[in-house]
Amino acid sequence: MLTSLSIKNYALIDALLVDFNQGFTIITGETGAGKSILLGGLSLILGKRADLSSLKNTDKKCVIEAVFNIESYKLENLFKTKDLDFDSQTIIRREILPSGKSRAFVNDTPVNLNTLQVLGKHLIDVHSQNQTMQLVDDDFQFQIIDALADNKANLKSYQTTLQEYKKLQKELKELYAFQAEALKEQDYNAFLLKELNEANLVDGELETLEEEYETLNNIEEIQDKLTQSHQLLQDEELGILNLLTQLKNTLQKLSTYANTYQNLFTRVNSSLIELDDAFAEIETLQENLDADPNRLEVVNAKLQLLHNLMQKHVAENVSELIDIKEALAQKVSETENLEESINKKQKEIQAVAKKLDTIAKSIHDKRHKTIPSLTKQLESILSDLGMPNAQFKIEVTLAKEYTYNGKDQLSFLFSANKGGQFNALKKAASGGELARIMLAIKSILSNYIQLPTIMFDEIDTGVSGEIANKMADIMQNMSNSMQVFAITHLPQIAAKGHTHYKVYKEDVDEVTTTNLVKLSHDNRVVEIAQMLGGLEVSTSAIAHAKELLN
């Protein structure tokens, strides 16, 4: 509920601060006193765009601040979604600077107008004859029926399942697109994969083959150098091993004299052992060395194949070729298995569609079941509001297409006159009739769901007498479960309010300003008497006013 409203430097308002209570609040005032200014200021809180013409004094900023008690509104998730701090006493502030720039805040967090508009829908519903066109909207009509049918849980389940259905459909569409593209490349990818498979790629084999190639290609030089090395080490007179053996024997005699000679002997002996091992390896290499022109040709051919493949696939080494081969294998496999994947996805979609159909049928059945009750309530209330012949013909029909709120097509027809043709609301009802229909609908809805604060802006235009009393009773009954405001010119409605405010103009230092004041009981008597008989208050008007208030 709206608990307070502060307006500074807006239109004809210098500064205004007013607190509001729960229940039924009345706002009255002469034509032109500034009731529309009050609504205009409130609309800025709800996200309407502003301009410099809103400023009373263009040298100062305009500030409008509203405090709402939203403890029972269940808006925690909305605040979380909009990244706002939730507070049961939420403050919305709007500022219009002399530069023309506008700023908005929710609990001191800067927000854009879209956020204000989304939040505002949950806080205040300003209802006037000009806004009754919402009635002709299918979505709103479904909301009415679903509220009475208690379809909230079903609709939530349906919408979650619909999201899953659309996701699966998107995935199927992507599979078809991938299949079409993959089929174009299938033959070429299969050829590339076959080529790489036939190469029998082994990680690291390029380096091994290059070493083998260098050995086979230089076999004669290697044989010559190994023979020379063998002779240098093993020559009977000047061979390195013989000379080093003599040196070892010489130093062995000294090794017993001191550690210095012992260390020297050890080093020479180690060298001899190492050279002896090298000599043995040279002999082994000589024995294994074999000129093989055929093997050289095979190695050379494999190297050429690898280098050609690396160049073709822009690969740095065989390891990258293996990665490319695996990726191609995956593509070829996916293409070959796409039909199976598509069939599987189609079965998933069919299963979810079956679930959707079941939920949609449940939603439809509950809607169908609740329509007679809605029709009866609407016609009863409208009869009290001076439309005794009002009739509704509301039907829901299951269709094939999935919409965001089920599979129903809605026919919401109305006839205002006995024996008249049923037609769509926008064609069958006048503006005044639409206003009364909307009042009837809102009064019914208030019994089923938590509605935000509602402000009826002169929806009683053209109404008088007993019908005005009925309208007042409806609004008063609604106020038992929600906060209701009524801006009115009718004394019958004004008298039914729990709280009464008056909008008035006054001239101070040749400057006109608009103010809002809460009326005491005695002031309410005078105000209602003036609404009954004009500014010149008669004794009978006072008596009538007291009677209405009592």
Image (cartoon, rainbow, N blue to C red):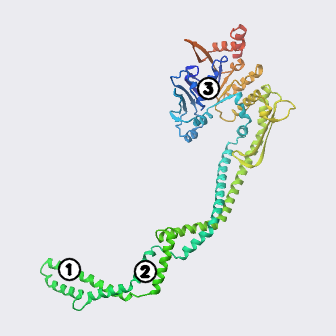
Q: Nearer the viewer, residue 222 or 66?
A: 222
Query: N-terminal of the two: label 1 or label 2?
Result: 2
Q: Position of residue 55 (x, y in %)?
A: 56, 23
Instruction: Work out whether residue 444 can be spotted.
Output: no
Name of the residue lying farthest toward the left: 257
Determine which residue is flagged by label 3.
40
- Splitting the image into 4 quarters, where does residue 190 fall? bottom right
Q: Secondary structure at mark 1?
A: helix
Q: Secondary structure at mark 3?
A: helix
Q: Amino acid at mark 2?
A: Tyr
Determine which residue is flagged by label 2.
213
Q: CA distance from mark 2 to mark 3?
A: 91 Å
Residue sitting at 66 percent across and 16 percent down? 30
Q: Secondary structure at mark 2?
A: helix
Q: Amino acid at mark 1?
A: Thr
Residue sitting at 67 percent across and 53 percent down? 165
Quadrant including the C terminus: top right
Q: Amino acid at mark 3?
A: Gly
Query: N-terminal of the two: label 3 or label 1?
Result: 3
